[in-house]
């Protein structure tokens, strides 16, 4: 991965909107062919960061480089390789979807509409509908088509799945995976952990304008330690087990339950130990990005409190 | 630097607004021009003008009537003098005078003949002989009847005049009977007396010159001769006594008849004239006669008033002042009876350029630019701020389109759409004027073209300003309330300022409201200067153009520098 080409490089990016709003000292890099996720609550700074990348906002401090060019100064040049789905869906004052696509194609200097038509078919969009009367989902599909039809190398998608029904969301995520397969670099933001978990290589958690953690999904999923939840029938067994030197990450006393993390190579040792206990059940706890970040966040907040 | 695609997009987004505003403005303008042309507001103005001319004529007629009346009265009042003089002279030994004149004339004539060896005397010589005769006769009388003459109150010059006339009478007809000669002499000296006195009197009047005094005194002489004839016939009647009222009645009748004759004469009525023409002429003659009569009655009533209640009129100290004041009162027309300010206002209304006011100041500076202004406010906002606010600008700026290309394209669209709008308005105005055309219509083609140019430049300045606001603000509401708000405010100020500007007649003008004109750049569109052929409007046009250019440029630069929430 180290040899990969840097596509988006954010360095010390700061934009202070006062009252603890804005983004502060962001640093991350998106490499070529990578799908980079951006997750965070409302107002955490996802959109502000994306606007910087798009060159709509001038950084207060630090800079954003896209393909080696400054996002603010060379905004226009960068756009030759960038497609964008804005977070807020508002179309120009045009009559129908077709008119809008034509106008966009003209702005993109795009002659061939085959790709656009294919996308329209895939998303089951009626492009002859009146732009203003479209439902939220239809608008979102229209925005997706407009962004993808230019076949750009870099896709910047600000909450692209809002308003889509679950089936459409699946279709869209398929599309994204296809784009990724074509070698495109994708940066998308979302409030939904699961969709980022399934599509992204890496996901950054942004909270109060600061990046808390950047999770490498593949690494986490294929980690050489796993978590297991164990419930004991006997209370004494439960208490006895807790005295053993396992890495307990969650303890639910009420149910006589523990969750332990253990390296794969030590799994046999665990079973040897467990032979002597009467278990109600044992199950593997699957990796979950949301839980993963929650854990990190809780630690950070705890850490923050401790510091205070 | 220019995006054709964006330009098309802007056209598609705004063509309905453009069409509505353009059609509405053109229709409005056509209706205004055609309505004004066919309703012929100038006729109303002309009739108002007519009222003033008529009032002037009425005043002149009345003045003439009073003057003629006074002239007649002046001459008639000397009829007293005629009688006195007649009696006086009758009291003189006329035979002695006549004989004395005759002998003196013959003596002087003979002396001349002797001195010039019988050569016939020339005209100048005859004058010399007459003067010597008058001198001799006067000296003779002064010696013998000096006391008696003095008691009659006749001056030396008056007596000498009388004698001169007697000499002339003798010279022209030596066989004439002495009584006839004396009566002729008496009448002639009387007429001369009237003329001289009238001359003196008129010379004292206000605005009198020697010429007018001479003319008036000659008129008085003519009137006096008329009076003498009247006197002769009246006095022939048994028991007739001349009183002041008789004079006045006579004078009034005379003046009425004179005015009637004069007015009738101006109509050139001949036997071939139609009945209608005759009736018309008769009507005007009688109406004038009535006016004359009114004037004279008024004159008399005022004289009476001055005489009876002198305490009310301290400024009138003598007869001449009383007469001149009464003359002014009597000659007053309708316009003189109303307040001077009101009369001035009405007069201004009569002279006002209605087309200039309604088309130049009301249409092109207010009503006609209202809709284009609404168009500019809405479209300027929609071209930038509206799209930034809604977020749709993201679709343009996420393509390889420079911000400057966006602003330049949108600016071009705004300017070109305005230009196209005003080209159509110009065509409409020219065609409308051509339809209603004619000499009555005071606005010519050059002026209407300049008015259109002015309206365009005004809108160009507003467009630049609104565009700049649209560029500076990310929110429609701010762009609209600053750009649109100030524009509308300026239009309102122009409407209010109109009531204080000098295009509105004094009667409707409120001077203080002119203050509003200083708050509006529409004041730089100087329609009055254009319509009055001035050159002031040129530099003001320059400023309007400059405002537009500067604000457009500022708009382009601001948009490049700012953060966009897209």
Image (cartoon, coloured by chain):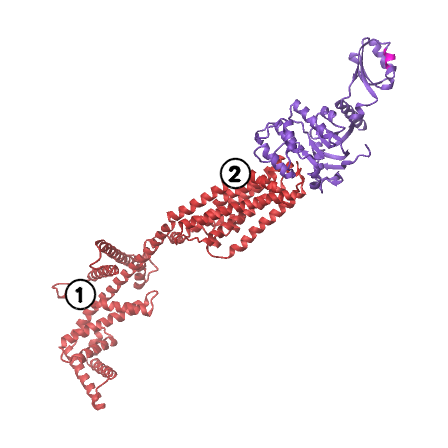
Chain colours: A purple, B red
Q: Is residue B92 visible?
A: yes
Q: Nearer the viewer, residue A255 or A56?
A: A56
In the rendered view, would you say B421 is above or below A157? Answer: below
> Which element type, helix, strand or loop, lies under badge 1?
helix
Residue density around tag 2, few if under 14, some if 14–19, many if 20 or more, within 10 Å: few
- Of badges 2 and 1, the one in the foreground is 2
* Image quarter (top left, top right, bottom left or bottom right) of the N terminus of chain B: top right
In the rendered view, would you say A218 is above or below B54? Answer: above
Q: Are marks 2 and 1 in contact (CB under 8 Å)?
A: no
> Which element type, helix, strand or loop, lies under badge 2?
helix
Q: Report the magenta stretch's main SS.
A: helix
Magenta span of residues: A270-274
The image quarter in which residue B93 lies? bottom left
Give the residue at mark 2: B16
The image quarter in which residue B141 lies? bottom left
Q: Nearer the viewer, residue A233 or B303?
A: A233
Q: Nearer the viewer, residue B69 or A228?
A: A228
Residue at screen point 84% across, 22% down = A224
Q: Are marks 2 and 1 on the same chain?
A: yes
Residue at screen point 61% across, 40% down = B5
Residue A10: image x %, image y %?
Answer: 76, 36
């Amino acid at each position: 991965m180290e040899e990969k080409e840097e596509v988006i490089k954010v360095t010390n990016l700061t934009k202070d909107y006062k009252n603890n709003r804005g983004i502060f000292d962001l640093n991350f890099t998106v490499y070529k062919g990578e799908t980079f996720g951006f997750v965070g609550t409302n107002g955490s700074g996802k959109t502000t960061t994306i606007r910087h990348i798009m060159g709509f906002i001038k950084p207060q401090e630090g800079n954003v480089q896209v393909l080696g060019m400054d996002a603010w100064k060379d905004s226009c040049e960068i756009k030759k390789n960038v497609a964008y789905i804005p977070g807020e869906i508002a179309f120009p004052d045009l009559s129908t979807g077709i008119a809008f696509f034509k106008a966009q194609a003209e702005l993109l200097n795009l002659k061939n509409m085959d790709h656009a038509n294919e996308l329209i078919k895939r998303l089951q969009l009626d492009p002859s509908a009146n732009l203003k009367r479209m439902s939220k989902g239809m608008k979102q599909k229209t925005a997706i088509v407009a962004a993808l039809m230019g076949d750009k190398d870099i896709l910047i998608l600000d909450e692209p799945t809002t308003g889509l029904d679950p089936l459409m969301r699946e279709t869209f995520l398929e599309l994204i995976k296809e784009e990724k397969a074509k070698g495109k670099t994708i940066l998308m933001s979302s409030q939904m952990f699961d969709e980022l978990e399934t599509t992204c290589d890496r996901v950054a958690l942004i909270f109060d304008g600061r990046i808390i953690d950047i999770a490498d999904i593949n690494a986490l999923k294929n980690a050489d330690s796993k978590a297991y939840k164990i419930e004991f029938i006997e209370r004494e067994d439960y208490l006895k087990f807790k005295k053993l030197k396992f890495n307990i990450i969650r303890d639910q006393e009420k149910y006589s339950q523990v969750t332990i993390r253990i390296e794969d190579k030590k799994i046999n040792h665990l079973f040897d130990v467990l032979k002597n206990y009467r278990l109600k059940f044992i199950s593997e706890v699957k990796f979950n990005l949301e839980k993963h970040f929650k854990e990190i966040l809780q630690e950070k907040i705890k850490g923050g409190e401790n510091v205070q | 630097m220019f995006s054709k695609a964006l330009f098309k997009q802007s056209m598609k987004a705004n063509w309905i607004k453009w069409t509505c505003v353009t059609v509405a403005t053109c229709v409005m303008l056509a209706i205004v021009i055609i309505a004004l042309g066919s309703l012929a507001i100038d006729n109303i103005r002309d009739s108002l003008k007519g009222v003033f001319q008529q009032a002037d004529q009425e005043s002149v007629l009345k003045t003439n009537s009073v003057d003629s009346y006074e002239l007649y009265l002046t001459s008639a009042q000397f009829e007293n003098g005629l009688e006195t003089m007649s009696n006086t002279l009758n009291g003189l030994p006329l035979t002695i005078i006549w004989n004395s004149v005759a002998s003196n004339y013959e003596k002087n004539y003979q002396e001349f003949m002797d001195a010039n060896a019988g050569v016939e005397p020339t005209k100048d010589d005859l004058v010399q002989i007459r003067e010597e005769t008058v001198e001799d006769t006067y000296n003779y009388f002064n010696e013998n009847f000096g006391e008696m003459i003095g008691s009659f109150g006749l001056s030396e010059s008056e007596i000498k005049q009388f004698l001169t006339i007697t000499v002339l009478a003798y010279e022209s007809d030596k066989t004439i009977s002495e009584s006839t000669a004396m009566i002729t002499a008496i009448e002639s000296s009387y007429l001369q007396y009237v003329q001289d006195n009238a001359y003196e009197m008129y010379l004292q009047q206000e605005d009198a010159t020697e010429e007018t005094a001479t003319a008036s005194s000659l008129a008085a002489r003519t009137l006096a001769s008329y009076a003498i004839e009247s006197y002769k016939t009246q006095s022939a009647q048994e028991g007739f006594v001349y009183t002041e009222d008789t004079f006045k009645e006579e004078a009034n009748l005379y003046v009425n008849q004179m005015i009637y004759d004069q007015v009738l004469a101006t109509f050139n009525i001949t036997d071939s004239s139609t009945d209608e023409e005759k009736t018309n002429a008769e009507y005007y003659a009688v109406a004038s006669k009535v006016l004359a009569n009114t004037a004279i009655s008024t004159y008399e009533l005022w004289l009476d008033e001055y005489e009876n209640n002198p305490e009310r009129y301290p400024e009138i100290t003598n007869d001449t002042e009383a007469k001149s004041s009464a003359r002014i009162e009597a000659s007053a027309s309708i316009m003189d009876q109303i307040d001077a300010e009101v009369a001035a206002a009405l007069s201004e209304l009569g002279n006002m350029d209605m087309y200039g006011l309604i088309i130049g100041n009301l249409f092109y500076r207010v009503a006609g630019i209202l809709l284009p202004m609404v168009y500019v406010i809405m479209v300027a906002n929609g071209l930038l701020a509206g799209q930034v606010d809604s977020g749709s600008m993201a679709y343009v700026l996420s393509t390889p389109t420079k911000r400057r290309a966006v602003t330049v394209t949108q600016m071009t669209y705004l300017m070109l759409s305005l230009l196209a709008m005003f080209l159509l308005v110009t065509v409409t105005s020219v065609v409308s004027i051509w339809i209603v055309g004619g000499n009555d219509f005071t606005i010519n083609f050059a002026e209407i073209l300049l008015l259109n140019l002015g309206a365009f430049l005004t809108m160009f300045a507003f467009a630049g300003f609104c565009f700049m606001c649209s560029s500076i603000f990310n929110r429609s509401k701010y762009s609209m309330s600053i750009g649109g708000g100030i524009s509308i405010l300026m239009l309102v100020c122009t409407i209010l300022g109109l009531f204080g500007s000098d295009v509105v007649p004094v009667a409707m003008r409120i001077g203080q409201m002119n203050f509003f004109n200083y708050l509006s750049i529409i004041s730089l569109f100087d329609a009055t200067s254009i319509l009055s052929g001035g050159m002031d409007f040129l530099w003001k046009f320059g400023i309007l153009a400059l405002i537009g250019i500067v604000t457009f440029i500022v708009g382009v630069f601001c948009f490049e520098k700012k953060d966009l929430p897209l």
